């Protein structure tokens, strides 16, 4: 009887130590997910720091449009070689409180939620993050990454740098990226020679660059242009352009 009892105890001990693959796989999956997330965060932070000094060579949108169209028009130009009214026009059009927030315009977000529309809630900082580090689209994953990266960009980059990058990566016509290509394509001038009207017209096409034209503006674009010109003058007068102007 004693031998049988001892044999049963050994069988139970073996059963307890038997390999269980599911918990092992879940443990490794969790470890790999954590490791992958950590690597992703460190990579993005390294790029944010790098792009403080180095201009982003390409973005996902530019790459995908180049594949679709065969070629794109884009030439980087320093913000010092862009007329100040162009910068003010873009801010007036896309993010009038650019100098007053740290990446997220809470009032604009609330207004967009109340109106049932997402338009107007995305700041220039968020758009830069989406264009430079992520991809286009409305997925929750992309939005979550955008929300996580935007504060880092705001902390590491100056407002002037954020706006400089935006002016050089935003799509301003089909296959046309950045203010240099837009100024020369629409009006045959360099960015430092743009008039307030021309700058406002370029800013007016930003919400829909593939369907709007700055050189052949529709009535809607003309109306928006007039509003942007007023807005650019207003933010200069009330100090909301101070964070990106010398």
Image: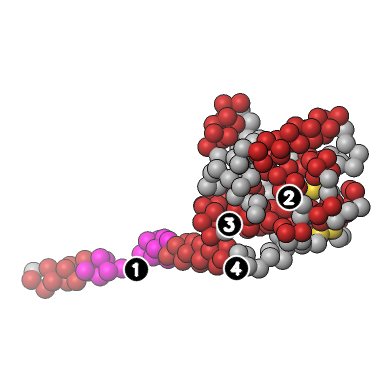
How far apart, in angstroms, are the residues tagged by discs 2 and 4?
26 Å
How far apart, in angstroms, are the residues tagged by discs 2 and 1?
68 Å
Residue annotated with mark 3 = 158
Seen from the viewer's position, the closer of residues 19 and 90 is 90
Select label 4 or label 1 by which is in front.
4
Residue depicted at x 65% and y 54% = 246
How far apart, in angstroms, are the residues tagged by discs 3 and 2?
17 Å
- Is there any visible trace of residue 189 in the rendered image? yes
How far apart, in angstroms, are the residues tagged by discs 4 and 1?
47 Å
Residue depicted at x 57% and y 26% = 114
Magenta region: 13-30
Residue annotated with mark 2 = 84
**Tag 2 or tag 3, which sits nearer the N-term?**
2
User: How packed is label 1: few (under 14 Cα within 10 Å), some, or many (20 or more)?
Assistant: few
- Secondary structure of the residue carrying tag 3 is loop
Mark 1 and mark 3 residues within 8 Å of each other at the beta carbon = no
- Image coords of residue 187 (percent x, y): 90, 48
Q: Left of 7 or right of it: where is 225?
A: right
- Image coords of residue 205 (percent x, y): 79, 41
Q: Which mark is residue 50?
A: 4
Select label 2 or label 4 by which is in front.
2
Residue depicted at x 83% and y 40% = 197
Q: Which mark is residue 144?
A: none
User: How packed is label 4: few (under 14 Cα within 10 Å), some, or many (20 or more)?
Assistant: few
Select label 3 or label 4 by which is in front.
3
- Image coords of residue 54 (percent x, y): 66, 68
How far apart, in angstroms, are the residues tagged by discs 3 and 4?
13 Å
Seen from the viewer's position, the closer of residues 221 and 89 is 89
Seen from the viewer's position, the closer of residues 105 and 28 is 105
Q: Left of 57 or right of it: where is 139?
A: left
- Secondary structure of the residue carrying tag 1 is loop
Q: Is residue 46 above or below residue 213?
A: below
């Amino acid at each position: 009887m004693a031998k049988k009892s001892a044999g049963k105890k050994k069988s139970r001990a073996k059963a307890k130590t038997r390999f269980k693959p599911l918990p092992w796989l879940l443990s490794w999956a969790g470890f790999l997910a954590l490791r992958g997330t950590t690597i992703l965060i460190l990579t993005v932070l390294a790029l944010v720091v790098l792009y403080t000094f180095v201009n982003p060579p390409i973005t996902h949108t530019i790459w995908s449009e180049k594949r679709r169209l065969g070629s794109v028009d884009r030439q980087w130009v320093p913000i010092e070689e862009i007329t100040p009214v162009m910068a003010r026009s873009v801010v007036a059009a896309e993010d009038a409180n650019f100098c007053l927030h740290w990446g997220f315009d809470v009032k604009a977000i609330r207004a967009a939620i109340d109106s049932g529309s997402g338009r107007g809630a995305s700041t220039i900082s968020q758009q830069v993050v989406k264009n430079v580090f992520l991809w286009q689209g409305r997925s929750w994953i992309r939005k979550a990454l955008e929300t996580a990266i935007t504060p880092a960009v705001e902390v590491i980059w100056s407002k002037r740098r954020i706006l400089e990058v935006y002016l050089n990566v935003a799509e301003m016509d089909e296959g046309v990226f950045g203010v240099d290509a837009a100024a020369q394509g629409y009006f045959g001038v360099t960015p430092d020679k743009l008039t307030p009207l021309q700058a406002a017209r370029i800013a007016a096409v930003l919400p829909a660059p593939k369907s709007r034209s700055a050189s052949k503006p529709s009535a809607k674009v003309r109306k928006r242009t007039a509003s942007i010109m007023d807005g650019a003058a207003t933010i200069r007068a009330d100090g909301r352009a101070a964070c990106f102007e010398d």
